[in-house]
Amino acid sequence: MDIFQKIISWIPPLLSGARITIGLTVTSVSAGVILSIFLALGKISRQFFINKFCSGYIFFFRGTPLLMQLYFIYYALPMMSPIFIIPIQNQELNRFAYAFIAYSLNVAAYSAEIVRAAIQSIDKGQFEASRALGLSYAQTMRLVIIPQSIRRLIPPVGNEFIMILKDTSLVSMIALIDITKATRSIEGSTRSALVYIPAMILYLIITWIFSFIFHRLEKKYSVYE
């Protein structure tokens, strides 16, 4: 019975950590996907500098570890120049802001390739017909191509969401109290490895919920294909 009482006492701090995990995942993936649209359009652009900049951005963030990016943004950039210091007094919110930036930039790079592939999968006849009707390039992308691409983005973006959900455990390295950090704190104070069991179950539950949501979205929009 003592074991169950311990597990119950661990639930509140784990749920508090889950709030950070879910909040960081939802906000960073949302921001990253929006940014990825511009990166994808930039990479397929015929403008040399725009194309090279977007290609270089994607190469950099896909080619370096997420943990290294998090360290660089949280530790290195503020040391390099004061303009990179986020003026938030609350330490928890301050760490969250840096983590949000790092994860959003990382998601944008990976999602840009997903968006690019989705856009280029649309039949070229759609683009040509839109231009023949007098639509500009921007109007064609905004009104014709991108809306059709969204349905094809749901499965890979869902996979990216789940990957980031699990990768948020890295924020414990900058002392942001997510599920992993809360678990390690409890384990350190109680010397009980049993805390990892409810922590992993909590991750599984959150992953299952969001997997179910993306599965329902995929089924809903696939009927229009």
Image: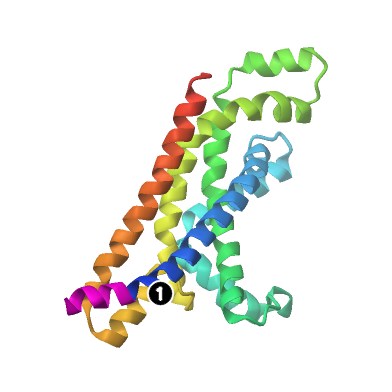
Describe residue 47's horizontal placement relative to residue 160 as left or right. Answer: right
**In the image, what residue occupies the spot 55% across and 51% down?**
29
Whether residue 202 is visible here, answered yes or no, is yes
Q: Is residue 147 magenta?
A: no
Residue sitting at the far bottom: 189
Question: Which of these two is toward me, 193 or 124?
Answer: 193
Vertical order, 122 against 193 (above or below): above
Instruction: Please state the horizontal and vertical placement of residue 224, each as a whole percent of the image.
Output: 53, 19
Describe residue 206's horizontal placement relative to residue 69 as left or right. Answer: left
* Quarter where residue 183 is shown: bottom left
Location of mark 1 (residue): 13
**In the image, what residue occupies the spot 71% across and 78% down?**
87
Describe residue 152's horizontal placement relative to residue 192 as left or right. Answer: right
Q: Main secondary structure of the magenta part?
A: helix
Describe the colour scheme in one phrase: rainbow
Instruction: Please state the horizontal and vertical placement of residue 1, each as a whole percent of the image.
Output: 16, 76
Q: Is residue 2 magenta?
A: yes
Q: Residues within 10 Å of mark 1 (few under 14, many from 20)?
A: some
Question: Which of these two is toward me, 10 or 44?
Answer: 10
Q: Which residues are the magenta region?
A: 1-9
Describe residue 186's horizontal placement relative to residue 177 as left or right. Answer: left
Instruction: Please state the horizontal and vertical placement of residue 138, each as a whole percent of the image.
Output: 77, 31
Q: Amino acid at mark 1?
A: Pro
**In the image, what residue occupies the spot 45% across and 41% down?**
213
Whether residue 119 is visible here, answered yes or no, is no
Vertical order, 138 against 84 (above or below): above
* Quarter where residue 103 is shown: bottom right
**In the image, what residue occupies the spot 48% across and 59% down?**
22
Numbered label tally: 1
Element assignment for label 1? helix
